[in-house]
Amino acid sequence: MGNIRNAQKRYQEGRKYHERAVENMKVTLGKKHYFTGDCFYSLAVDCMRQGHDEEAEKNLDAAIRAFNAETYREAQAVRAIWKKGCLLRARGDLLGSEVLFKEAMQMRQSLVPDDARQVDTLLDKDWASPIFFWSR
């Protein structure tokens, strides 16, 4: 529902739905389940859109922990690492962002070996495309 509200540009409502989803998933599936990670990621994107950087970073860290719990979640982890790099760069932490971008690009290379584009040319859709469709 949060994604639907965001598509309608009703961002406050979308964020509320994502907040509820995070709480529900933590209780029902635990903090390390990939659905919970997806919810953390969506909430982080909402927070970034609204300028709540500290909360966005906290949710991205939680998403990364959830995705790193199992190797088959690598595509989701890569996207979250890249997004955290974007957040750090926007805040002026160029060194921190470069470390994350380098890590994300190394991981992405194993997922999409024929794509030689540089990190600055990649868009959200490029990071989402290797992810199972239900987690995009």
Image (tube, rainbow, N blue to C red):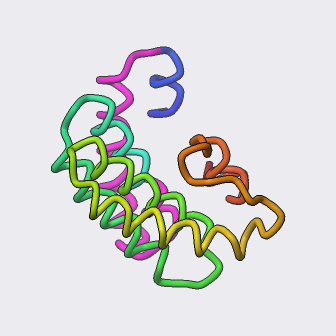
**Residue farthest to the right?**
114
Q: Position of residue 29 (x, y in %)?
A: 43, 71
In the displayed structure, does residue 131 sit left or right of residue 113?
Answer: left
Residue 72, by quadrant, is bottom right
* Residue located at (67% from left, 47% from top): 126
Q: Quadrant of residue 73?
A: bottom right
Residue 109 rendering spot, x and y as whole percentages: 69, 71
Which residue lies at the image location 26% right of the left edge and 29% below the top edge? 50
Q: Work out whether residue 89 or residue 54 is closer to the camera in this orientation and state it.
A: 89
Q: Tell me if residue 132 is in the magenta stretch.
A: no
Q: Is residue 117 left or right of residue 114?
A: left
Residue 52 lies, with reference to residue 82, above or below; the image says above
| Span shown in magenta | 9-38
Nearest the viewer among 7 and 79 is 79
Query: What residue is at 39 percent from the left and 16 percent from the top?
Result: 10
- The rendered magenta stretch, by its main secondary structure, is classed as helix
Q: Residue at x 38, y 29 (%)?
A: 14
Q: Position of residue 86 (x, y in %)?
A: 38, 48
Tally of numbered discs: 0
Give the percent coordinates (x, y) of residue 88.
27, 52
Q: Quadrant of residue 81?
A: bottom left
